[in-house]
């Protein structure tokens, strides 16, 4: 929690002000989350202080923010494999507090972390918190603006895909909220982008892409293998089937199947 609040101070997320008349500040919750890797082990502990109970038309207006589709991630994996480069992954620490908000929003001081001098004051937000409806939109706008100023071109169809061409080399960036996948034909270009992002935002460089949106990814020299073994184990564990006997064929092999004499004939060539 202290790390999260220190991020707020570094990013100038809020100002402590007197409660405004005729405005009701929104509350906050504490949310603690463990981020897991492909093996189910905890790779990062997260603490969030989201705002709650914001009202449309008062605390926010527009909320839409583009999000990468799973099909787009698979296409990017196939493209990277065909071009012979590996994708990397980075995570933005406290992504939403990097995004500016246009609305006037006030938040109560979090319980247990009130100001000793001004316990009755509230925070006026400069930037977004986790929780307000417009937070994803504000973060996407900030990241998009930074990438476009850095020379990237946004995809005409997929607005979460950005492309940078420099000389004969290419760098591709795909964003999914605060997770960023990137890779390119030049190691120097990839390293330069990682350093550039770390200077602008607080980043966690996670190395080679291995686990993303429930997909386990193995990038080899000649191919990329995608599977969901962890997801399958989690489903089996959820329904108490973790110790069940595995079968190569998901049906009985002893069942006799007879021809349907009254059924309609099917031309197999159609299939």
Image (cartoon, helix red, strand yellow):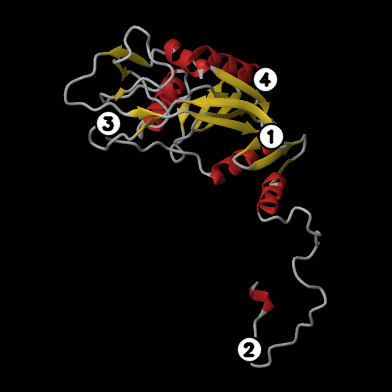
Residue designated by label 4: 187
Residue designated by label 2: 263
- Earlier along the polypeptide chain: callout 3 or callout 2? 3
Q: Nearer the viewer, residue 93 or 76?
A: 93
Q: CA distance from mark 3 to mark 2?
A: 62 Å
Residue designated by label 3: 59
Give x and y (percent) for residue 209.
66, 32
**Left or right for 33, reference 251:** left
Q: CA distance from mark 1 to mark 2?
A: 48 Å
Q: Residues within 10 Å of mark 1 (few under 14, many from 20)?
A: some
Tag 1 and tag 3, C-beta contact below 8 Å: no
Q: Residues within 10 Å of mark 4 (few under 14, many from 20)?
A: some
Give x and y (percent) for residue 227.
70, 46
Q: Nearer the viewer, mark 3 or mark 2?
A: 3
**Left or right for 128, reference 254:** left
Q: Note whether residue 66 is visible.
A: yes
Residue designated by label 1: 210
**Where on the picture, by quarter, is residue 105?**
top left
Q: Residues within 10 Å of mark 3 (few under 14, many from 20)?
A: many
Q: CA distance from mark 1 to mark 3?
A: 38 Å
Report the residue at 78% width, 58% height from top. Answer: 244
């Amino acid at each position: 929690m202290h790390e999260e609040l220190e991020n707020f101070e570094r990013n100038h997320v809020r100002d402590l002000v007197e409660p405004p008349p005729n405005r009701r500040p929104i509350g906050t919750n504490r949310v603690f989350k463990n981020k897991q890797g492909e093996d189910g082990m905890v790779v990062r502990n997260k603490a969030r202080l989201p705002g709650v109970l914001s009202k449309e038309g008062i605390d926010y207006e527009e909320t839409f923010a583009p999000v990468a589709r799973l099909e787009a991630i698979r296409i990017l994996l196939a493209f990277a494999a065909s071009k012979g480069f590996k994708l990397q992954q980075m995570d933005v620490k406290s992504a939403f507090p990097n995004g500016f908000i246009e609305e006037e929003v006030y938040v109560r001081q979090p319980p247990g972390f009130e100001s000793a001098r001004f316990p009755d004051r509230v925070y006026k937000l400069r930037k977004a918190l986790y929780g307000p409806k417009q937070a994803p939109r504000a973060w996407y706008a900030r990241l998009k603006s930074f990438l476009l100023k850095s020379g990237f071109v946004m995809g005409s169809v997929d607005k979460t895909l950005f492309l940078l061409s420099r000389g004969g080399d290419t760098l591709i960036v795909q964003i999914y909220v605060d997770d960023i996948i990137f890779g390119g034909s030049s190691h120097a270009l990839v390293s330069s982008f990682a350093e550039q992002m770390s200077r602008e935002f607080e980043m966690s460089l996670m190395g080679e892409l291995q686990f993303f949106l429930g997909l386990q990814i193995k990038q080899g020299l000649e191919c990329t293998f995608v599977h969901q073994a962890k997801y399958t184990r989690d489903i089996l564990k959820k329904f108490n089937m973790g110790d069940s006997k595995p079968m190569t064929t998901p049906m009985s092999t002893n069942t006799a199947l007879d021809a349907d004499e009254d059924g309609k004939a099917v031309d197999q060539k159609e299939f």
